[in-house]
Amino acid sequence: MNIQTLKEASDCLLNLAKPETQAIEHILLQDAFERILAEDITAKIPVPSFAKSAYDGYALRQADTAAASPEHPVTLDVTEVIPAGSVPTYPITEGKAARIMTGAPVPEGADAIIMHERTSFTENTVTLTAPVTSANIIPPGEDVAAETLLVPKGKILTASDLALIAGQGIAEIGVYKKLSIGLISTGSELLNTGSPLEYGKIYNTNPYLLGGYIQKHHMTANYLNTVSDDLDSLCRAVLDALKTNDVVITTGGVSAGDFDYMPEVIRRIGGDLLFHRLKFKPGGAMLGAFKDGKVILGLSGNPGAAATGLLCVGFPFMRKLSGRSDITFSQTTAYLGVDFKKSSPVTRILKGHSDFKNGMLYFTPLSNQHNGSVSSMSDCDLLAIIPAGSKPLAAGDKLEVYIL
Amino acid sequence: MNIQTLKEASDCLLNLAKPETQAIEHILLQDAFERILAEDITAKIPVPSFAKSAYDGYALRQADTAAASPEHPVTLDVTEVIPAGSVPTYPITEGKAARIMTGAPVPEGADAIIMHERTSFTENTVTLTAPVTSANIIPPGEDVAAETLLVPKGKILTASDLALIAGQGIAEIGVYKKLSIGLISTGSELLNTGSPLEYGKIYNTNPYLLGGYIQKHHMTANYLNTVSDDLDSLCRAVLDALKTNDVVITTGGVSAGDFDYMPEVIRRIGGDLLFHRLKFKPGGAMLGAFKDGKVILGLSGNPGAAATGLLCVGFPFMRKLSGRSDITFSQTTAYLGVDFKKSSPVTRILKGHSDFKNGMLYFTPLSNQHNGSVSSMSDCDLLAIIPAGSKPLAAGDKLEVYIL
């Protein structure tokens, strides 16, 4: 086991993610918002599937209007009214026109629509005082050509994706079953919310912090009980969680203290320890393990450190396993908003928030980067990874950042 | 009724939004991700609530180590081991130390923690070769001081908000009941998904597009049936929808065509027409009405136009009604990515997507701004409002944009 860097750990887990083994469920399109598409959706029909009118007006032949002028108006006979959704009865021949509504199919023979505001009309006639020169006809396939790949497999479905699929008449689609992530917190100092405060103990915040991030990733966070620092209970909790979840995440029990049981838990339950203690801060005190085809991620007990471990090492793997094709957070360049006065002997993960000023993106490190701090995670929407060996940074320096 | 601009219409609806009338429900914190908080959450206890150790190590008195050097090491007697979550038994007096774990309460009398790696130790003693000069003690309230406003009423709960609330031991909170938005599509040309294609008809995409945006806003989209262009059916559908939804949105039937029934529907059901036809493109062909204390929003039948109407006029109102304190989309400056060659005689809402290049935010208008186009909404994450009377715009021009 020679995995030591963030990238090595992340790659090791990615190799274990087999999204093709994830169950697929077929659901109604209206229930599919932000689900992950499990099939390519290709246009079977062009949209629109017929030539349609762009306006309320008259369908006619441009040639019939070529000589129209205020002095010599042209009057055409109106054959019928074509509401949207109906089928024209008559073709348009010389001297004829049809009243037509927006979206209605253009009758055979017509090559243009004139808006009704630009005509004078009676029930049976329409009169023009200028030649019609624009078609105002939406041709078949203008919005979507047949055979276009509309939405690729692995995409998180947005509002417009759903509309594109609906435009094909598709009522039901295949999506990946949501991943279930079991969350176990270890630590005799932890109190569950709702219980009375005791001296020397703290309320357990990790499942709420990590659970929120997990739900933001369209996975189900399965809040399990807090387990005290006891090897047997911890082994039982992890084995139980493996039965009903796709991934098990523990917090606590991974650093060098006397009561840091997690590596021993992995050995006892017969799991493979993939890595333990990575070279980055905060959150490097973590482990990855594999048991019964599933990954166990042991994160730091400190909320800020647990969050960076989950974001940087856990999510690329979990996003891939959930079926997503965009495995990593998107990356961009930002300007550092303030001086960052510490040097970084090991790789440092810096939490920050975005500020837009005058069209430029600034990264402002959160004021409290303390590992144990929950308040420091507030408004964190960017992460920067500062390479090991970096000197202090100055306001205005350019940084590569990940958008959370 | 002299409401004509986007701002006038938006303000008119905002005046009708009374979030204080929205029902509040009390739910478990673990179910509250992305719900809207209906109460201020203030810290009742400081976090941490006691002085705790930042490391695994030894709690001691700095004064006892002042003379320590490699030549004259100082050895202290270890009184006890203090695991996290336990209460110390003995105070630290001269010459004493206690083995202490990260997060454990610091015993009385100790003013510093030395990391165990920096000491040599036996079961009963610890030896130092340098004075201890940093405290490494996390004081009560370091993360959260008592009486701090942790999360304000009206905020959409993020992962870190949930953790901050959990840190107080709170298990249940009050959130606003999710708004239910009834979606009615009118148009005889519309086919429901799942039915066979007919010539001259199109599949109805509007509820999927608008429903997606509504769900992105943490509201429930209630997909109702497609109604044909028939006054009686339409009146019945709107009245039914008003009974069980907080807001009713219709698409179609609002422009000047022969079959545009919506204003007449509002009159027949005894609603107040607040505005009809606004001066912006696309989507200005819309209406707002009020009936039985609820708002009816009649949007264009064209998906792209309906979406801009919903985003620009509907959402400020619906966000306020849902209890959110951030009513409008956040706004920033971006650089136009390409030339936009059209002038804008009326206010123009331009859909676009964001591109970050070298730390700068670019707004690139979507290639197909056709109202009827669904594919044009794909990847739209920014809107720009181009004032009436604007000339064509050049790549590199600065624009005020809304972040969707």
Image (cartoon, coloured by chain):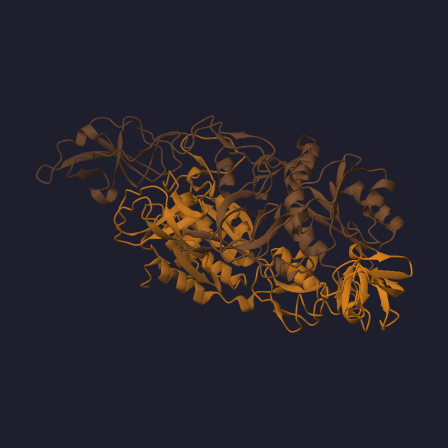
Chain colours: A orange, B brown
* Residue B61 can be seen, yes or no: yes
- Direction from residue A100 to residue B45 in the image, left or right: left
Residue at 39% across, 59% down: A267
- How far across and how far down the image is residue B229, in percent? 85, 54
Q: Which of these two is toward me, A136 or A35?
A: A136
Horizontal side of residue A300 vs A182, given as left or right: left
Could you say which quadrant of the image residue B186 lies in?
bottom right
Residue A279: x %, y % from top left: 31, 54
Vertical placement of residue B68 versus B383, above or below: above
On the picture, is A366 further left or further right than B202? left
Residue A207 visible in the shown view: no
Residue closest to the eye, A97 or A257: A97
- Which part of the image, by quadrant, shows the N terminus of chain A? bottom left
Dividing the picture into quarters, in which one does residue B29 lie? top right
Quadrant in which residue A54 is drawn: bottom right
Residue found at the very far front of the displayed protein: A71
Q: How many marks?
A: 0
Task: Give x and y (percent) for residue A254.
Answer: 37, 50
**Residue found farthest to the right:** A124
Relative placement, left or right, of B353 versus A360 is right
The residue lying toward the viewer, choosing from B362 and A210, is B362
Where does the image place residue A27, in percent across and percent down from the top left? 68, 61
Q: Residue at x 12, y 32 (%)?
A: B67
